[in-house]
Image: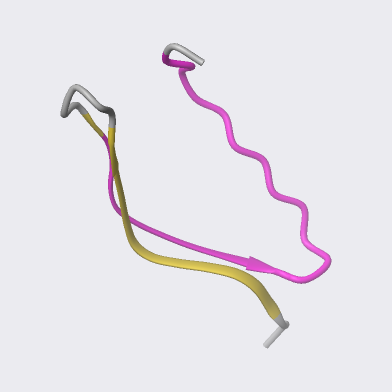
Amino acid sequence: MSELILEAVNLEYSYPDGTKALRKVNLQVEKRREVSYSGLKRGW
């Protein structure tokens, strides 16, 4: 198994108005792997 450089377990996020953006997200990023994320942009 490769070395993990980032791990998130059951990550949750809500906007200040209470709208849920993430619920129970699990993520593992291994060393020397490329990662991309895309999605809707909300007020940034």
Q: Quadrant of the N terminus?
A: bottom right
Spot occupied by residue 38 in the image (x, y as percentages of width and height): 57, 29
Q: Is residue 25 above or below residue 36?
A: below
**Residue at horizontal 49%, vertical 25%?**
39
Is residue 41 found left or right of 9 in the rendered image?
right
Question: Does residue 19 belong to the magenta stretch?
Answer: no
Spot occupied by residue 3 in the image (x, y as percentages of width and height): 72, 82
Of all residues shown, which one is farthest toward the left? Answer: 18
Is residue 19 found left or right of 10 in the rendered image?
left
Question: Does residue 37 belong to the magenta stretch?
Answer: yes
Extent of the magenta region: 21-42
Spot occupied by residue 26 in the image (x, y as percentages of width and height): 40, 61
Of all residues shown, which one is farthest toward the front? Answer: 16
Q: Quadrant of residue 19?
A: top left
**Residue at horizontal 77%, vertical 52%?**
34
Is residue 15 found left or right of 32 in the rendered image?
left
**Residue at horizontal 69%, vertical 49%?**
35
Spot occupied by residue 11 in the image (x, y as percentages of width and height): 34, 57
Q: Is residue 14 above or below residue 25?
A: above
Q: Quadrant of residue 8?
A: bottom left
**Residue at horizontal 83%, vertical 66%?**
32
